[in-house]
Amino acid sequence: MNLEKKVAVITGASRGIGRSIALNLAKQGVRLVVNGTNVTRLNELAEEIHHEGQSCVVVAGDASHAETAADLVQAATKHYGSIDILVNNAGINLRRSTLETELQEWKKVLDINVTSAFLLCKAVLPVMMKQRKGKIINISSTTAKTPHKNASPAYGVSKAGLNYLTMHLAQEMAEHNIHVNAVCPGPIETDMSKQWSEPYRAAVIDKIPLKRIGKSENVADLVSFLASDLSDFITGQTIHINGGSYMN
């Protein structure tokens, strides 16, 4: 995929899909700056990547804060001199109905799921514009396209907003040779899905044509493709990866 020596900034990298994305890119020679709020897990990830002979810098902090975005850009440019790939993966879910959702909960979900991506893009884009190239991949969800009883309205709204941000930036940044796409995973095996009851898991699998739940590595493979030269004529897209549970 011609990713050797590229530089990637990844938010929400301490576990789940974000961790798999970091490990996948590292195996292909990408130099990393990883972010999250769990310092212990981030350091463990960096140690694993270093053990494989690749470079990884840890920048802990809340991705919904402008200061964290600035710190990530500074770390990438200081250590590597460029930023080729940005993966906005930081996100949280909230399992509340509309009437149960408090205003502060609503704001927190939107801040982490979509405002963080806005702040990271705003911080990274000047570097990519100067380079005349870049790949931005936003990790969204099929919940952005169809409601889900197991997710709050705040989660769906935040991911729908992320999809629009993806399209807007793709149009705005095309003249600078910057590609912006979103990945919309469906049911994926993560720490969250491991907490499902067996009846609920069976019900989820029954609705998937491929009759299995995806792996975080499946999402990581798609992200690597979008980060590579193989995707050079793809921008402004929201790409589904869900075993057929949502088709468009």
Image: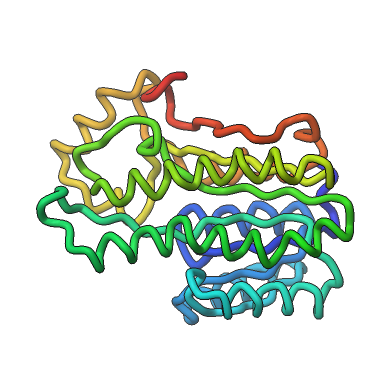
Q: Position of residue 17 (x, y in %)?
A: 49, 52
Camera-nearest residue between 44 and 97: 97
| Image-based side of 99 in relation to 207, left or right | left
Camera-nearest residue between 62 and 22: 62
Q: Position of residue 50 (x, y in %)?
A: 70, 73
Q: Residue at x 16, y 45 (%)?
A: 197
Q: Quadrant of residue 76?
A: bottom right
Q: Position of residue 40 (x, y in %)?
A: 47, 81
Q: Residue at x 31, y 55 (%)?
A: 93
Q: Does 186 sit above or below residue 21?
A: above
Q: Position of residue 82 (x, y in %)?
A: 83, 66
| Image-based side of 216 in relation to 76, left or right | left
| Image-based side of 225 in relation to 102, left or right | right
Q: Does 117 sit above or below residue 62?
A: above
Q: Residue at x 62, y 47 (%)?
A: 137
Q: Does 187 sit above or below residue 7?
A: above
Q: Residue at x 55, y 54 (%)?
A: 20
Q: Does 87 sit above or below residue 72?
A: above
The colour scheme used to paint the residues is rainbow
Q: Quadrant of the N terminus?
A: top right
Name the outermost residue toward the right: 131
Please give the count of numbered marks on the rendered protein: 0
Q: Quadrant of residue 208?
A: top left
Q: Quadrant of residue 47?
A: bottom right
